[in-house]
């Protein structure tokens, strides 16, 4: 089983963020939400490890409290 990486691990994070914002540019809220949902599913499929995905869900839920 792998562990979720929570330390900075993204090369060119600013470029990714800019691309993410550009993908949402001009979208209505429902379309933006749908894009986010599809992105989550694509990345979850790429990860492919339910234990790591559960760790990610738990980590994301903690950020909302």
Image (tube, rainbow, N blue to C red):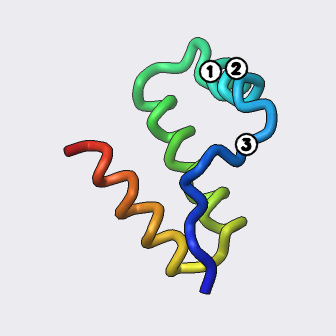
Considering the numbered disc 3 on the image, is that residue within a helix, a strand or a loop?
A: loop
Q: Position of residue 48 (x, y in %)?
A: 65, 75
- The residue at the point 60 percent across, 87 percent down is 1
Q: Position of residue 18 (x, y in %)?
A: 70, 20
User: What is the quadrant of the C terminus in the image?
Assistant: top left
Is residue 25 or residue 13 the one in the foreground? 13
In the current view of this chain or complex, which residue is farthest to the bottom? 1
Is residue 51 or residue 24 the one in the foreground? 51
How far apart in space, not on screen, are marks 3 and 2 (Cα)? Answer: 13 Å
Considering the numbered disc 1 on the image, is that residue within a helix, a strand or a loop?
A: helix
The quarter holding residue 14 reads top right
In the current view of this chain or complex, which residue is farthest to the left? 65
Which comes before the other along the chain, label 3 or label 2? Answer: 3
Is residue 23 or residue 59 the one in the foreground? 59
Which comes before the other along the chain, label 3 or label 1? Answer: 3
- The residue at the point 57 percent across, 73 percent down is 3
Q: Which mark is residue 30?
A: none
Q: 10 Å neighbourhood of mark 3: few (<14), some, or many (≥20)?
A: few
Q: Which mark is residue 21?
A: 1
The residue singled out by tag 3 in the image is 10
Considering the numbered disc 2 on the image, is that residue within a helix, a strand or a loop?
A: helix
The quarter holding residue 52 reads bottom right
How far apart in space, not on screen, are marks 2 and 1 (Cα)? Answer: 5 Å
Q: Which mark is residue 18?
A: 2
């Amino acid at each position: 089983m792998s562990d979720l990486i929570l330390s900075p691990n993204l090369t060119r994070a600013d470029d990714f963020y800019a691309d993410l914002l550009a993908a949402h540019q001009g979208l209505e809220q429902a379309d933006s939400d749908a894009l986010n949902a599809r992105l989550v599913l694509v990345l979850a499929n790429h990860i492919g490890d339910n234990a790591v995905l559960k760790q990610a869900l738990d980590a994301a839920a903690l950020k909302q409290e």
